Amino acid sequence: NHRRRRIYEGKAKILYEGPEPGTLVQHFKDDTTAFNNEKHEIIEGKGVINNRISEFIFTKLNEIGIPTHFLRRLNMREQLIREVEIIPVEVVVRNVAAGSIAKRLGLEEGTPLPRSIVEFYYKSDELGDPIVSEEHITAFNWAAPQEIDDMMALSLRVNDFMTGLFAGIGIRLVDFKIEFGRHYEGEMMRVVLADEISPDSCRLWDIKTADKLDKDRFRQSLGGLMEAYQEVARRLGILAESD
Ligand code: C5P
């Protein structure tokens, strides 16, 4: 039912040409992947719930003055976004040791980090998103020094906001990944938050039970992924109403 031109198709999302110049439609698929596509499954309804959760978070971030690409939700699986030039750097913010940092630095999963740590990864499926430093980012011109500063400052603001948001509903924000884009308005260019924020890109642990409420349920074949994502949506107060 799409007459719109497909601009880009990723593992979990499709971008279509938008209704007005400078806009795109971001479509959330049910595809669930891990280990750089080695593990792949369709989990029915995941796209619908991630569309809602990401809408909820981006709306709040817009409200507190963090610039994002999000404009409005269009339907169950789609949202209208501003067209941006994606910066090929994934920013990971960590509050608690888990996943790759636990492995790399020999830390026990669940150990609180001495402070929030921001890491950069080069966005490349072929290379499996290798970790990089600011030196690599500027040397290869993936982003300018000022853009790195902007991404770092925005990431910490997103972390502060989300840590509080999730703590209020009994969830520990362990870590998350975000992406940024360049938004051009005439001569002006600014760095804005892009992509999505959902349980696909965060680690969310129930404060009471330590249950994992995120994509680790899929990575570790724990089952119950949809139930976990629905629980996150329910606690955020997002109604499971259909359109
Ligand atoms: O695997 P790692 O511990 O580095 O992941 C850190 C955080 O970034 C996790 O919340 C994970 O879901 C997210 N992530 C992601 N996309 C990637 C790599 C990591 O959303 N390509």
Image (cartoon, grey):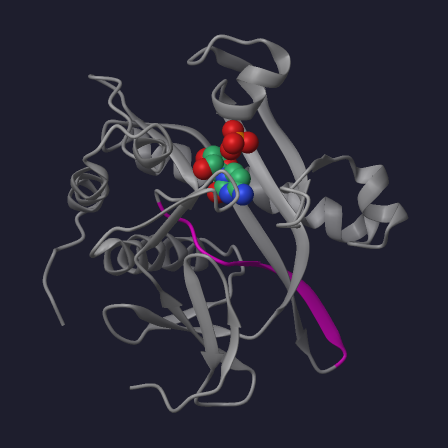
Q: Which residue is drawn at 38% across and 91% down?
A: 3
Bounds of the magenta span? 187-198
Q: Which residue is drawn at 63% across and 42% down?
A: 128
Quadrant in which the C terminus appears: bottom left
User: Left of 129 or right of it: where is 174?
Assistant: left
User: Left of 218 or right of it: where is 83?
Assistant: right
Closer to the camera in the image, 10 or 40: 40
User: Does residue 173 show up magenta in the picture?
Assistant: no
- With respect to residue 72, does 56 lie above or below? above
Closer to the camera in the image, 126 or 82: 126
User: Does residue 189 show up magenta in the picture?
Assistant: yes
Residue 67: image quadrant is: bottom right
Task: Indicate the position of residue 139 as horizontal and vertical percent values.
Answer: 90, 47
Closer to the camera in the image, 63 or 8: 8
Task: Indicate the position of residue 166 as horizontal and vertical percent values.
Answer: 31, 34
- With respect to residue 170, does 188 lie above or below? below
**Which residue, as the protein is rendered here, is positioned at the far left?**
241
Task: Indicate the position of residue 208 as horizontal and vertical percent values.
Answer: 21, 17
Is residue 176 among the parts visible in the rendering? no
User: Left of 236 or right of it: where is 37?
Assistant: right
Task: Indicate the position of residue 14 as horizontal and vertical percent values.
Answer: 44, 69
**Which residue, as the protein is rendered here, is positioned at the far front?**
38
Quadrant in which the N terminus appears: bottom left
Residue 231: image quadrant is: top left
Q: Residue at x 21, y 46 (%)?
A: 233
